[in-house]
Amino acid sequence: MAEQEKALLIKRYASRRLYNTETSDYVTLEDIAGFIREGREVQIVDLKSGDDLTRQYLLQIIAEHESRGENVLPVNVLNDLVRSYTMPGGGVMPQFLQASFDMLRESQSQMVENMSAMNPLAQMPGFEAMKAQQEAFLKAMTGGLSSGWSGTGAAAEEPAQKSDDGEDLDAIKQQLADLQEKLSKLK
């Protein structure tokens, strides 16, 4: 776990090639997106100048997904982001977004904890498979935002099915709605 807490260092060479310092090989933007989906933090630095290029490359990953027709962010959120940078005091938006994603990760973590061995359903046959499916569902719904998932790769590739316990998902939806309301009040 200590290794996952340390950011994966990617060096950008003058040729713009990206080099993974852990595995000593070149990587693509899609490889970096995969590391992030797996819960790894990455840091991308220019080899020559030492400049941190992480933000630039993360935005490029999002832009490439958008250009392929994958709607990463709704248009109204993109509009709000652009507005926040052109308004005086626009520095509120980054902190708000960070707090929102922190709350989402915390909710996911709490949901996984609720499904732990102390849960009486854990004794039910097939509970582990159901738990893995729900974890895969949540990960798919949030784009893998949580770094604490312990689901297996096989379960993550199967189509996720919603379990009978949709109350936690409803609570997360309510929290997101509350956050959207707070955001609109900040305008």
Image (cartoon, grey):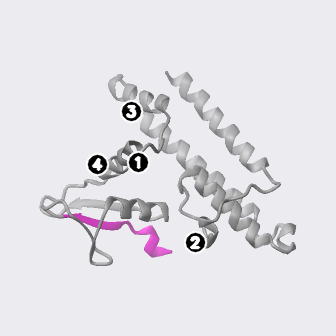
| Residue located beneath label 3 in the image | 91
Residue located 83% across and 54% down the image: 164
Q: Nearer the viewer, mark 4 or mark 2?
A: 2
Spatial separation of the CA atoms under disc 3 and disc 4: 18 Å
Q: Name which quarter of the figure residue 10 lies in.
A: bottom left
Q: Are marks 1 and 2 in contact (CB under 8 Å)?
A: no
Location of mark 1 (residue): 65
Q: Write down the residue under mark 4.
A: 56
What amino acid is found at the position of numbered circle 4 in the picture?
Answer: Gln
Residue highlighted by disc 2? 153
Dot 3 and dot 2 residues touching (CB under 8 Å): no
The region drawn magenta spans 1-12
Going by the numbered disc 1, the residue's amino acid type is His
Residue 83 shows in this picture: yes
Mark 3 vs mark 1, foreground winner is: 1
Task: Decide which of 173, 132 is in the foreground and name it.
Answer: 132
Callout 3–callout 4 Cβ contact below 8 Å: no
Q: Secondary structure at mark 2?
A: helix
Q: Amino acid at mark 2?
A: Gly
Pick whichever of labels 3 and 2 is earlier in the sequence: 3
Q: In front of the other: label 3 or label 4?
A: 4
Earlier residue among tags 3 and 4: 4
Q: What amino acid type should be assigned to the residue bearing mark 3?
A: Gly
Q: Along the polypeptide, which appears first: circle 1 or circle 2?
A: 1
Name the N-terminal-most of marks 1 and 4: 4
Q: Would residue 2 be counted in the magenta stretch?
A: yes
